[in-house]
Amino acid sequence: MLNSILSGDYPRSRPLAILLGLVLIGLAFAPFLFPGSQPLNVAAKICVFVILVASYDLLLGYTGIVSFAHTMFYGIGGYGVAIAMYNFSATWPALGIGIVIALILAILLALLIGLFSLRVRAIFFAMITLAVASAFAILASQLNEITGGEDGRSYRIPEMLRPAFRLFDDPVLGVNINGRILTYYLIFFSALFLFLLALRVVNSPFGRVLQAIRENDFRAEALGYRVVVYRSIANCLSAGMATLAGVLMALWLRYTGPDTTLSFAIMIDILLMVVIGGMGTLYGAVLGAAIFILAQNYLQVLMGQFSGMLESAGIPLLPNLFHADRWLLWLGILFVLSVYFFPVGIVGKLRQLRK
Amino acid sequence: MSDNLLNLQGVQTHIGQYHILHGVDLAIPRGQLTMLLGRNGAGKTTTLRTIMGLWQASQGSITFDGRDITKLPTPEIAQAGIAYVPENMAIFADLTVRENLILAARNGDLDPARLKWIFGLFPALEKFWSLAAGVLSGGQKQMLAIARAIVEPRDLLLIDEPTKGLAPAIIMNMVQAFKELKSTGATILLVEQNFLAAKLLGDHVAVMDDGRVVHRGAMAELAGDAALQQKLLGLSMDAHQ
């Protein structure tokens, strides 16, 4: 059973299995374990980024393709929901239409970019994706009538997912099951399903060919595999998953704008999460996303508390060094250290320890 | 049906600004092992890569079993029945031994009887079946690369310097495996620098120099003619075994 669910791809390290278990339990019971809007917001963001990072790893880690257009597909998902919800009524059919159109557009774009640029050198593909993603971001900002321009779009979502909706009259385990929590579980289960689907893809014969192509595309061709076809399919799969991640984020935020979907900063975040978790292992996406987003949201608070403690103890200089305003500096240092000590990512390191 | 499975006529190959093959004429007889010899830089590897379509021939023609494959893309050439073992232990290091072999099985399944035969040739592969190929020794990696080429019957095997960098004991194992492979009637074009291996295995020989085939004939004839060896290869086979 478990073998089938995980497609035979076990964590292969006890500490890794424990960490993944903790993340899974934490996310599955987040509304009950960590009440409040901020923890739920962090948990939802982790779920969405697990999918976004896993889909990027399918390209970078499993196929060896560097793309800078991943946030474009994420944005297409977000704008698909935004445009449908803003222009039509906030109903499930309208949402479905928005998702389907976004998926079709994303996959077509991925296919076009892939067919034009994946048959040549990888660096050319990276440059093309960078150019297309930049053009798309500018287009989204300029098409004010459709996308809301720089301000983006706020919209209503189906009633069942709105905060005012109550599933039960009475609280469950002390928590009111409202539309917000239903949205969270929609995101959680969608993310879980998509992650397990990605696990199945990378452990299938198709996934094996992708890994062979990553190692040596000439050898894969000499075995009879059409590298450009496999790369294009991987590109489309990855784009489709990123689009669905954008859809989930749009449902959570009820807002879509260039800064929340298309910004290059998100692309850098995705790259960092892949590197921290470990390239070429989907479990790395789970740990990378969880650690990065937790650090992004709580490091500032923790540092503020730590700085206060040092100050009250009368220690000179250090309170200033650990001041909450310096959190970005420490986040940067943490990333440098993690890449230095875990060059193969956390998952790779934990698996090495086992050996 | 022609006696020759593969024919190269006037094949020229350019790599960037460099003109590497200057008109290669070569015929590979069916069911025989043809050795391709020559000094370093003579164009042996380029010839194999041009046959596989990894580098496109700029002139000339390559016919395989009567079909012109000169302009075909590499995957189609492989699917036509040509297996290629590049030099330098060309395995997929991150995949397991099993996964490396499955990759070469066109329908995704390994034939148990064929696998048993391969394990007979290369017992180490059975031992390290589930291990990442990257941790194998040099000789074992080379065995895996060859096993991948023969995991399914192929019409023609192109093998580039299989004994390069291997210990003498492993080379003799490899020679034994090729002898057994020959006995199945396989057609093989083998690039080799180890003259003892070449002498023990070759039915025919083609010697290349400066991007051309400068000698064709029986291997035994070249092996027995020290003066010819000196003229073609610049050394004597007996002195370099």
Image (cartoon, coloured by chain):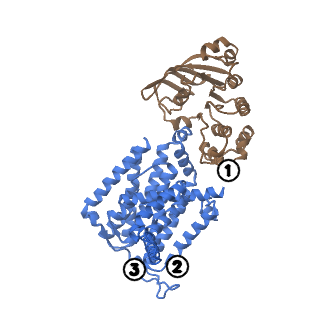
Residue at 62%, 62% (x, y): give it: A4
Residue A220: horizontal and vertical position, in percent?
54, 41
Whether residue A170 is visible, yes or no, is yes
How far apart marks 2 and 3 lie (CA) works out to: 19 Å
Give the residue number, with chain letter if any, for mark 2.
Answer: A33
Compare marks 2 and 3 and give the one earlier in the sequence: 2
Residue at 50%, 54% (x, y): give it: A58
- Residue A212, quarter of picture: top right
Describe residue A70's horizontal placement relative to residue A220 as left or right: left
Picture quarter with the N terminus of chain A:
bottom right
Give the residue number, with chain letter if any, for mark 1.
Answer: B130
| Label at residue A177 | none
The blue one among the chains is: A
Q: Chain of mark 3?
A: A
Query: Which tag is nearer the camera, tag 1 or tag 2?
Result: 2
Do tags 1 and 3 sit on the same chain? no
Q: Are marks 1 and 3 in contact (CB under 8 Å)?
A: no
How far apart marks 1 and 2 lie (CA) works out to: 41 Å
Give the residue number, with chain letter if any, for mark 3.
Answer: A163
Residue A7: horizontal and vertical position, in percent?
60, 59
Disc 3 residue type?
Pro
The brown one among the chains is: B
Q: Chain of mark 2?
A: A
Disc 2 residue type?
Leu
How far apart marks 1 and 3 lie (CA) works out to: 51 Å
Query: Which tag is nearer the camera, tag 1 or tag 3?
Result: 1
Label 2 neighbour load within 10 Å: few <14, some 14-19, many 20+: some
Residue B171: horizontal and vertical position, in percent?
70, 31
